Image (spheres, rainbow, N blue to C red):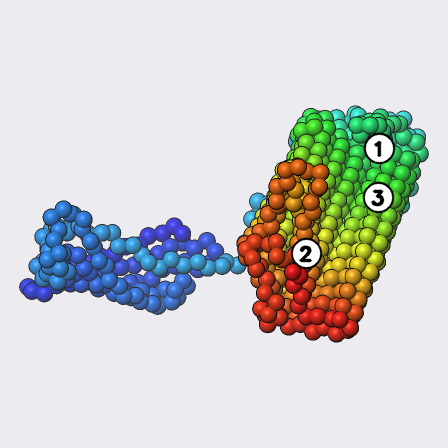
Amino acid sequence: MDGWDMELGFKLPLPIGPEVRLFGGYYSYDNPFGDDVDGLKARLEIKTGPYLALDAEIFEDETLNGSDFFVGARLQIPLSRDLSWNKFVDGLVSMEHRSLDERMRSEMVQRDVRIQSSESDWQENLAKRAVDVQSTVSTRTSKHSKTTVKSVQDGTPGEKTKITLADKITFVDKDNAADTSQDGTNEHPYGDDKGGIQKAVDNAGENTTIFVYEAGGQVNGISQDSSDMGGVYDEQVTMRPGQIITSEIIFSGHPTQTSYATVNRPLIKPSTVTYDKKYDTGWEIFEYAAAVTMPENSALQRMAVETSQDKTSAVWVQPQLGSGSVRIDRSVLRTSGPDADGLTAELDNASLENLTVSGSTISTTGEYAHGIGLWKENNASLNSLNVSGSTISTAGYYAHGISTDISSSSLGSLNVSETFISTTGDYAHGMSAYIYSSILDSLNVNDTSISTAGEGGYGISTALSQANLGSLNVNVVNISTSGEFARGLHTNIWESNLDSLSITDSTISTANDWATALDISAYSSSGSSILDNLSISNNSIVTTGQGASGLHMDLTSYGGSVYWGNLNVAGNSISTASDYASALWMTSWASASEGGSLIVGSLTIAENTLNAVGDLAGGVDLFFGKSTNPMNPNPIDSIFRLDSQAIQDNAITAQGTFAYGIRINGSSIVLPSPAFNAAALEAGNTIEVSGPGAEKVTINP
């Protein structure tokens, strides 16, 4: 705050004793968010010597502090060479008054200690009240069209107000096909029976906005996310860099309306498409096509796109200049046919900053038809793929909701939030991320629901091969699968690095034989697989099916090394309901003749509730094993090491023939030995078992 603070004082003329001074002052500050701050103040200062001072102050101000006071002491420690202890003590209690010269050289400026913060009332920046849409849009375009004016109801019965939506926007209206003066203005929009949107795209040029009217519809001036029955534009569209195709324009300045929008989304649905794209798989070249092709810095806003042709995506992202972002907002993408993705982004030796899908609905029908397919190879890069507030559904064999395939490239982050993903079909995953000789900084799934229905269908699947993944984070996610060999979440690390894997506050359920809720594995043959931190906490996990375990962790070495740093499973509720199903199952296997090594820094299984019902089912099942190769003339023994472990404070219930609370096999090969103690495990956990041959804790050998 601008203002001033003044103080005037004098030393009392005392012949002996300490220096005593009295001060009086006044302060005044201009407060732009309320009453000004001002008031009187008085201060007393007592210096017993050159090094010690005592002071007290009283001040009044109703606005900021109210009347208040403070007392204090100040100690000055001189760092001169000739300072001795006796001289320092004399400086604390000396009664000699200092000369003017001493005071000028040693006196410090006294700062005001009252530092306050306060919250003002709501303040409006009047300069920001009106947004000039016309000038804003005109800076983004090179087209010179007529001034765009539209009459809309302003709230007064019988009266309308002309509002300038924006200048230099290109307009398309299929109902205007008979107009011979089509020039892309709102007065004469492009209206060809076929090719109206593409004509607008070509004539408008880069960095422009194309507004599409719904055929046979109207504009009501109020944004409505209604259906996509806004008429059909039968054409294939290839956009230019920087272009936006939309059915809504946001504006300000009208007393009752904030947007100019169609009632329904206009629909781009070509009856036939030209195959103009190729994808080389290494053993086969596929020809592809798209209803809409989007380059960098383009956006599709509040539109609908549909195709019914094989190998034809609704939208294809294909950068031309090598930088920029692509955005799809509040749109509907639909395809029906094999290999027909809703959204395909194929980056080969290309770069893109961000690919964002928000508030949209994507649905596909057909084998290998993904909702979103991202393919990156040959040094391609993408900073982030962001999906939020959307619904994705697929139906077909191997048709994933979101499929990411990266080879010899990099992806900054894959972020999915507040999205519903459902798949129907064998081996159709909700999300998949396959990373080969590449880098993915982070994969984050939050507040999302994923369901799969089909054999081998995974909710979330990640596979790393000679790759690096910084972090995989799953938080507040609901995953449900139904099908044999399905997985709620599957992570496979093959001679790769994963810094951290965190699964928290989520619900995961599977319903069929050999369907595992959480399946995390690491393999190595000659190199190394590393998972530094694994944290699974506060989740609810339920499986129903023979051999359907709640959590399965697998470490396998065929000669290389597998290292898991900190493995923490805590605060979870895990229930299984069938034969051979373990609530928590960990397998470790190494080739004894190839010198494989398996190392776990720390293993913590604590405060979990584990329930298993079924023959040979149990709560915690740990297995350590070796295999030998008789053909190897120079066998090198493998290494099993568990630096620390804590299995404690768990509530375990197991019911069934030969059911078990905790079962550990092969512990004798684990260093340091003995790694586990049966009595300690039984005492440290609450274990209840029932059934013929059921045991609380078994360790073999």
Of labels 3 and 2, the one closer to you: 2
Q: Name the residue under label 2.
A: 623
Q: In this view, does 476 lie to the left or right of 303?
A: left
Q: Residue at the spot x=75%, y=71% of the render?
A: 693
Local secondary structure at mark 3 = loop
* Of labels 2 and 1, the one closer to you: 2
Seen from the viewer's position, the closer of residues 574 and 629 is 629
Q: Which residue is labeled 1 in the image?
A: 290
Q: How far apart are marks 2 and 1 (CA)?
A: 51 Å
Give how far apart the Cα atoms at labels 1 and 3 are. Answer: 18 Å
Sequence-wise, which precedes: disc 3 or disc 2?
A: 3
Please report whichever mark, 1 or 3, sits nearer to the chain's N-terminal start: 1
Number of other residues with Cα within 10 Å of mark 3, as a class: few under 14, some 14 to 19, many 20 or more: many
Amino acid under disc 3: Ala
* Residue 592, x across and y down, in percent: 65, 45
Observer-nearest of 620 and 83: 620
Relative placement, left or right, of 212 versus 493 is right
Q: How crowded is mark 1: few (under 14 residues within 10 Å), some or many (20 or more)?
A: many
**Rendered residue at 75%/35% (across/down):** 375
Q: In the depicted view, which residue is nearer to us: 462 or 271?
A: 462
